[in-house]
Image: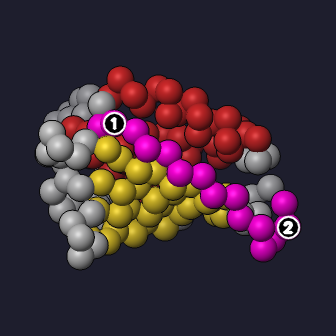
Amino acid sequence: MHETEILRQDFKIQADASKLSEFRTKLCELCAGEGIPAPALRLIVLAVDEAVSNIIEHATLSEDDRRITISVEIGEKKLTVSIRDRGLPFDPTPNRREPDQKSYPRRGFGLYLIHKIVDNIAYERTPDGHNVLTLTKVLER
């Protein structure tokens, strides 16, 4: 892939935790096919999975629109994942402290992990009522 070439693929999934496994498999196949090293791939999949899981659990999506659109762009030097939903507005971009493991033995690490894994995180609430969370990971290959 040349520096100016960018592969883009969109995925649409239902906001249902049982659909995440199939999406993770597709994301892994896409990224591995583009030569993203396995250690980076595992981290990227973890960050995206955490973000989508948070949307499914906390966004209070209406029964009419429970779709989540995930756009993946892979370039020579970075991978960008944009996650779009119509849930309640929530800006996850402020940096997160590491949760106290005694207070949160099994939960509360998602946003912290996302911030530790990705190189840039951006949030936008669009005029038409969508949340767009964009995660960018610099690739070293």
Percent x, y of residue 119: 53, 64
Give the image location of residue 129, x and y in percent.
21, 66
Quarter holding the C terminus is: bottom right
- Residue highlighted by disc 2: 2
Front: mark 2 or 1: 1
Check if residue 45 falls in the magenta segment: no
Instruction: Identify the residue shown where x is 24% and y is 55%.
Output: 86
From this viewpoint, is residue 86 visible? yes
Q: Residue at x 79, y 46 (%)?
A: 35
Side (left or right) of 116 relative to 109:
right
Q: Is residue 74 shown left or right of residue 137?
A: right
Q: Amino acid at mark 2?
A: His
Q: CA distance from mark 2 to mark 1?
A: 34 Å
Disc number for residue 140? none
**Colouring used for the render:** secondary structure
**Is residue 24 depicted above or below 122 in this figure?**
above
Q: Point out which mark residue 14 bears.
A: 1
